[in-house]
Image (cartoon, grey):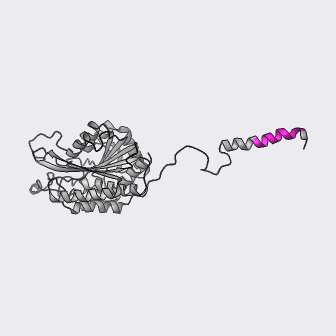
Amino acid sequence: MDKKNLFPTLIFLIIIPLLLFACGGGAEPGTGNHSERQRVQPPPFNADSAYHFVAKQVAFGPRVPNTEAHRQAGRWLAETLGRFSDTTYIQETRVRAYDGTVLNIKNIIGVFQPDNRRRILLCAHWDSRPYADYDPDPANHYTPIDGANDGASGVGVLLEIARLIHQQAPDVGIDIIFFDAEDYGRHRFSNLPDQDTWALGSQYWARNPHRPDYFARFGILLDMVGASEARFKREGYSMLYAPNIVRKVWETANRLGYGHMFLNRDGGFVTDDHYYVNKIRNIPTINIIHQDDTTEHGFFPQWHTVDDNMEVIDPFTLRAVGETVLSVIYSE
């Protein structure tokens, strides 16, 4: 080698590896120096476990405020959610129903990663309807219902999610709320006013949250998420208050193979717990709720009848909803 060309060559040999290193060249795939956070994979959702949580609630009997079944179920829910969450709040109060009945109610709140300021709200109602006022048999119109799908299914899915995030935390703080007295709204054949007679527990919480400064990036309400062949349309208030969250959830469901259940169609406006979380607390919250075009009332066929029992519940539907919600929160 000609000595007069040796120095430039050495400089070239030194600089090129340094440039390659600075650009990540020569590194093993996936081991380069980058600041992009790796996505946390959600744990697998156990539909059998969720089904067990639904059956356990139904076994107490109709969970109507002021009854012994309601008190026992409330204790069990608080203990179970308390085993999984970092902090548990029991929000007890008294509210007045549409007919003047004073109800002793209890909102049950599980907090995960309480110091994390980035938060997501997940919720469902745990009480059941005091009247089967849509039952085909008039003799049942004042009979309490089991509420396996209308109430217990959403709670069952969220208890399984609580169990999983207790084992493997996502990158955001989670608040799970079981609202009480959602289903003590006006009887179908009552002449009394109907305005704001539903979702009494969420109305109270929205005005009196467990933390005075509480806010979440968004919320997801689960209601009637366990029946066979369930179909979830884009509920009206969800699209009004939180259309981006609806799109996020529906796209996730479609990616997971549940597009035949999460339909690309607009549904009706449902006065449910999410309505008051949006209206009073200003947290953009959506409702995953079974809506059915073929029924008189627009919900699943056994809605507000004595047939809303464990025979209605399908583990596949619980899994579809649970996997979708898990994928959403672990992608944040």
**Relative depth, front residue between 202 and 137:** 202
Q: Which residue is pictured at 35% across the width and 60% down the height?
A: 47
Q: In this view, does 210 lie above or below 41?
A: above
**Principal secondary structure, stretch drawn in magenta:** helix
Residue 137 coordinates in the image, percent (x, y): 12, 56
Q: Quadrant of the C terminus?
A: top left
**Residue 44 position within the rendered picture, expressed as x and y whole percent measured from the top left:** 42, 58
Q: State which quadrant residue 71 falls in.
A: bottom left
Q: Which residue does the image show at 70% across and 41% down from the upper left?
A: 19
Residue 82, placed above or below residue 93: below
Q: Is residue 60 visible from the viewing direction of this image?
A: yes
Total numbered labels placed on residues in the image = 0
The magenta region covers 4-14
Residue 152 shown in magenta:
no
Q: Quadrant of residue 209?
A: top left
Extreme residue in the right direction? 2
| Residue 56 place in picture, x, y as percent | 26, 62
Tell whether 301 sits left or right of 167. Answer: left
Q: In which quarter of the image is the N terminus?
A: top right
